[in-house]
Every structure is written in C-alpha cells, then in structure tokens.
Amino acid sequence: NSVYQKLKEAKEDIVAANCLAHIVHNTMKYTVGKLNVDVENVILKAYSHFSVSAMRTEQLKEFCDFVEVEECNLLSHVVTRWLSLLPAIDRLLKCWKPLTSYF
C-alpha cells in the first residue's frame, strides 16, 4: 500500500530510489562508530558547557581574542535532527584553538 507500489501499478517503468542523504548518513554513522572518540558526544558536551553560563561564554570570547580567532558561538546538535551535526562540527573546528586553550 505504499506510494511507490501505487505509482508502480500506474506506470511500470518507475524505479525505486532511496534517499541518498540517509544512505550517506548511515554509512558515516557506521564509520564514526569505529573512531576512538564519540564526536556527537563531544559536540553536545562542549555546547552544554558554554550554553548554561554567560560567564563561560564571555571567557570563550576572551580566549578567541587571545588566539586571534574570530568570535564564534558553538552550535547545538539535536540528536533527532541528524543534519544539524555537520554545522555543529564545523563551528567546533573553527573554535578549536580557543577551546583547547580554554580546557
């Protein structure tokens, strides 16, 4: 009773196509599982560390100035929204020098 089956009944030469983004996501999820570091957890913990305190956010800005990196706020990753992980990783990498100095 799927949409694909209904379309296939109407027109036989329709080809089923899976969502390529989900295929890539599943591949990367499997690959990242082989790493020694849980990237998703690092993103979540770094964001939560700074999001709960205005003072910590100010300290991060000071570290950004100290290492001459343009200010950047960390982005949250929403676990149910898997497309939010890449922007969060990109932002974390932009702030890598200040973060390593901070911690």
Image: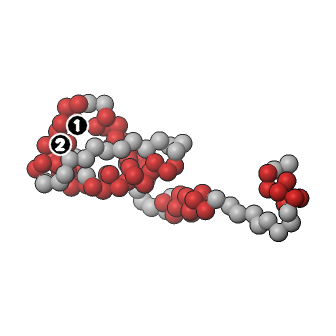
Decide: is 49 above or below 39. above
Residue bearing the label numbered 2: 61
- Tag 1 near tag 2, CB within 8 Å: yes
Residue that protrudes farthest toward the right in the picture: 9
The spot of residue 68 in percent (x, y) is 13, 54
Residue at the spot 32% in from the left edge and 52% down from the top edge: 91
Give the residue type at disc 2. Answer: Lys
- Look at 25% across and 47% down and name the residue there: 72
Residue farthest along the front direction in this orientation: 10
Query: Disc 1 versus disc 2: distance between alpha carbons?
Result: 6 Å
Establish if 13 lies above or below 58. below
Question: What residue is drawn where x is 25% and y is 52%?
Answer: 95
User: How busy is the neighbourhood of tag 1: few (under 14 within 10 Å), some, or many (20 plus)?
Assistant: some
Answer above or below: position of 76 versus 29. Answer: above
Helix, strand or loop under label 2? helix
Count of picture labels: 2
Number of the label disc, if any, that sits on residue 95: none
Residue at which label 1 appears: 57
Left or right? Give the position of 75 relative to 94. Answer: right
Q: Quadrant of residue 54?
A: top left
Helix, strand or loop at disc 1? helix
Q: Residues within 10 Å of mark 2 (few under 14, many from 20)?
A: some
Q: Is residue 45 left or right of residue 30?
A: left
Decide which of 86, 30 is in the foreground and name it.
Answer: 86
For badge 1, the amino acid type reads Thr
Q: Is residue 34 left or right of residue 97?
A: right
Which residue is painted at 39% across and 52% down in the image?
A: 87
**Percent x, y for residue 73?**
28, 43
Residue 65 x, y percent position in the rendering: 12, 48
Q: Is residue 30 visible?
A: no
